[in-house]
C-alpha cells in the first residue's frame, strides 16, 4: 500500500490543458533511494485513490496549521464519503484536492503567504488553470471569504478567511455539493441557484453583484455547526484556457460566526461566538 514515508506526491506544473497530472516519485523503502521517474496518472487502474487522498488531506491540514488554522483532514480515516464516490468522481476529487495543495505550495514558493488573500488567489488561479475577468482583483475587497466551485457545485479552492469559519473536514468539502453542506432560507437558496446558472451561462456580466441580502447560513452536518451571517459581494465567471466557462468564484463578507455544536457532536449549551 502507498504510504507517505514511501512516496512523495507532487503535481506536474503543466496546466495548459486544465488537467493536473499526479506524479509519484517512488522511494524504494528497502534502500531509501529514489527510483527514476516513476509516473502514475490518475487514469492508472491500479492507483490507490483512497490512500493518495488521505495523504494529500493530511498535508493540507498540516500546512494550514502553520497559519493558525485547525483543519481536519477527515473524521474517519477510512474516508467513507470519498469511498462512496464513483471512480470518476474519486479521480476528480483527488485532482481538486491535489491542486489545492499545489496552490498553497506555489504561493509559498513565490515568497508569499496563504493568508494573503490576493496573492494566494492569484497563485490558485494559476494552479487551477482558470482565467479570471480582467477586473477581478480590482473589485476584490480586503478580508473577504473567497471560494471557487466547479460547474457541479463542488468547492475546489477556498482562502484563509473561508477556512477560519468552516468546520467541515477536507474530505467533506471535496465530496459534497455546497447545497448539501449548508442550509439557508429557501428563497435565498433559490436565488443562489438562479444566479449561479446565470453566471455560468453568460446571462450576466463576468463579475456580478447578485444583490442577495445578508442572510444566515448554517453548516448542516459538520462537527461544530457554524452559523454564519453572510453578505455576498459578487460572483465571477472563471474560464478555462480555451475560453469556456469552467467554474465560478464567490466573494462574501462574513459579518458574524457562531459555533452551534460541540466537537463531540452533542448540542452546545449556547452558540459560541467566533472572533472575526
Image: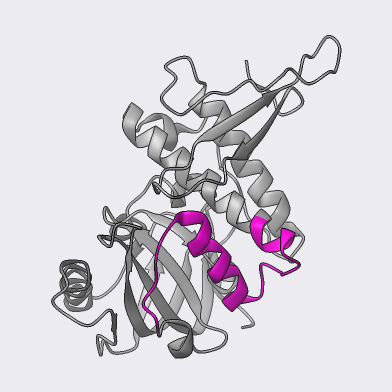
Q: Residue at x 27, y 79 (%)?
A: 206
Picture coordinates of residue 80, whole percent (x, y): 45, 32
Badge count: 0
| Residue 267 shows up from this direction | no
Picture coordinates of residue 235, whole percent (x, y): 32, 78
Q: Residue furthest right?
A: 31
Query: Residue 219's quadrant in the figure?
Result: bottom left
Q: Nearer the viewer, residue 68 or 130?
A: 130
- Was residue 211 drawn as part of the magenta stretch in this picture? no
In the drawing, does residue 183 fall left or right of residue 162? left
Q: Check the picture and name the quadrant holding the C terminus.
A: bottom right
Q: Nearer the viewer, residue 258 or 152?
A: 152
In the drawing, does residue 74 fall left or right of residue 8? left
In the drawing, does residue 30 fall left or right of residue 272? right
Q: Residue at x 54, y 44 (%)?
A: 98
> What span is in magenta?
106-134
- Was residue 133 drawn as part of the magenta stretch in this picture? yes
* 5 to 168, vertically: above or below: above
| Residue 228 shows up from this direction | yes
Query: Residue 134's quadrant in the figure?
Result: bottom left
Q: Residue at x 36, y 60 (%)?
A: 149
* 212 to 247, vertically: above or below: below
Picture coordinates of residue 255, whole percent (x, y): 49, 87
Colour option used: one colour
Picture coordinates of residue 1, whole percent (x, y): 62, 15
Amino acid at each position: 500500500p502507498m504510504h507517505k514515508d514511501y512516496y512523495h506526491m507532487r503535481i506536474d506544473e503543466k496546466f495548459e490543458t486544465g488537467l493536473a497530472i499526479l506524479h509519484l516519485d517512488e522511494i524504494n523503502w528497502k534502500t531509501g533511494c529514489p527510483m527514476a521517474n516513476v509516473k502514475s496518472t490518475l487514469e492508472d487502474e491500479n492507483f490507490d485513490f483512497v490512500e493518495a487522498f488521505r495523504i494529500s488531506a493530511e498535508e493540507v491540514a498540516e500546512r494550514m496549521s502553520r497559519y493558525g488554522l485547525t483543519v481536519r483532514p477527515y473524521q474517519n480515516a477510512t474516508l467513507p464519503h470519498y469511498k462512496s464516490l464513483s471512480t470518476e468522481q474519486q479521480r476528480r476529487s483527488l485532482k481538486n484536492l491535489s491542486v489545492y495543495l499545489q496552490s498553497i505550495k506555489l504561493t509559498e514558493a513565490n515568497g508569499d503567504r496563504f493568508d494573503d488573500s490576493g496573492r494566494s488567489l492569484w497563485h490558485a488561479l494559476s494552479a487551477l488553470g482558470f482565467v479570471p475577468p480582467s477586473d477581478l482583483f480590482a473589485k476584490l475587497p480586503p478580508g473577504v471569504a473567497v471560494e471557487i466551485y466547479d460547474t457541479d457545485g463542488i468547492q475546489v479552492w477556498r482562502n484563509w478567511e473561508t477556512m477560519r469559519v468552516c468546520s467541515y473536514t477536507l474530505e467533506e468539502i471535496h465530496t459534497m455539493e455546497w447545497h448539501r453542506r449548508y442550509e439557508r432560507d429557501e428563497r435565498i437558496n433559490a436565488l443562489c441557484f438562479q444566479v449561479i446558472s446565470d453566471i455560468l451561462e453568460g446571462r450576466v456580466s463576468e463579475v456580478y453583484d447578485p444583490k442577495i441580502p445578508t442572510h444566515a447560513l448554517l453548516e448542516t452536518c459538520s462537527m461544530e455547526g457554524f452559523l454564519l451571517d453572510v453578505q455576498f459581494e459578487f460572483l465571477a465567471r472563471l474560464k478555462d484556457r480555451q475560453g469556456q466557462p469552467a467554474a465560478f468564484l464567490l466573494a462574501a463578507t462574513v459579518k458574524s460566526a457562531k459555533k452551534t455544536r460541540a466537537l463531540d457532536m452533542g448540542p452546545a449549551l449556547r452558540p459560541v461566538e467566533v472572533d472575526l
